[in-house]
Structures are given as structure tokens and as C-alpha cells.
Amino acid sequence: MGTVIFQGEQPFELVPQTAPTARSEGEIVFVTLCIPDPRIPQSVALVQLPLSLQHAEQLAAQLQPAIRMAQVSSRKGN
């Protein structure tokens, strides 16, 4: 497993190359993002975020309203 180095000012923007995936192991939810690796052209780094069950539930609850707002903005052309 490699190391991700964050540079610049927060928040850091990691733009996934493909759709994120999620899987569970016990009470932990692992979210995996495929992020472009700026050090190597045409390559990606897999970033895995282990979330407790509680944090995964909180994130899921926040995603749905945010998706709806983004859809409305998209329809308005913003």
C-alpha cells in the first residue's frame, strides 16, 4: 500500500477517474476511489477510506440531499 501526499491548501480535491465502490467487512465500510496519480501519466492510485458503520450512515444521509441539489442545479444549467 502506498502513501498519498496532500499538498497545497485544504480542502483537497480528489477527482475520481471511475465510479467509487464500497464494500463492508464487519462493521467497517471501505469506500475505494480511483484517483489520477499526477506523478505518473496515464495511471491511477486507489484511495481506500475505511469508515465506521456510524460514519458511513452519516455520509449516506448527507449524500441524497446533496445529489438532489446538484440535479436541480444541473437542470438550471448552473
Image: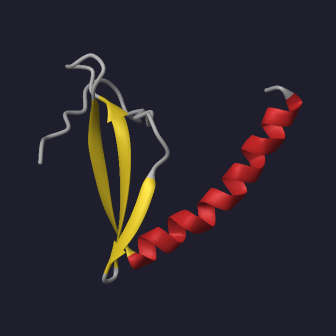
Quarter where residue 41 is shown: top left
> In the figure, is residue 48 to the left or right of 60?
left
Residue 56 image offset from top left, x and y in percent: 45, 69
Residue found at the far top of this picture: 41
Q: Residue at x 51, y 73 (%)?
A: 57
User: Relative to residue 66, is residue 61 depicted above or below?
Assistant: below
- Total numbered circles: 0
The single residue placed furthest to the right in the displayed view is 76
Say which residue appears at 69% left-offset and 51% top-offset: 67
Q: Is residue 53 left or right of residue 72?
A: left
* 64 sits left or right of 16 in the view: right
- Relative to 50, is 45 above or below? above
Q: Residue furthest bottom?
A: 26
- In this view, the residue in front, 49 or 8, is 49
Decide if residue 4 is on the left or right side of residue 31: left
- Where's residue 62, x and y in %? 61, 61
Q: Is residue 11 above or below residue 40?
A: below
Q: How is the image coloured?
A: secondary structure
Residue 18 spot, x, y in % from top left: 46, 39
Q: Residue at x 79, y 34 (%)?
A: 74
Which residue is at 12% across, 42% downward? 2
- Nearer to me, 9 or 13: 13
User: Which quadrant is home to the C terminus?
Assistant: top right
Residue 77 percent location from the top left of the image: 83, 26
Q: 10 and 13: which one is in front?
A: 13
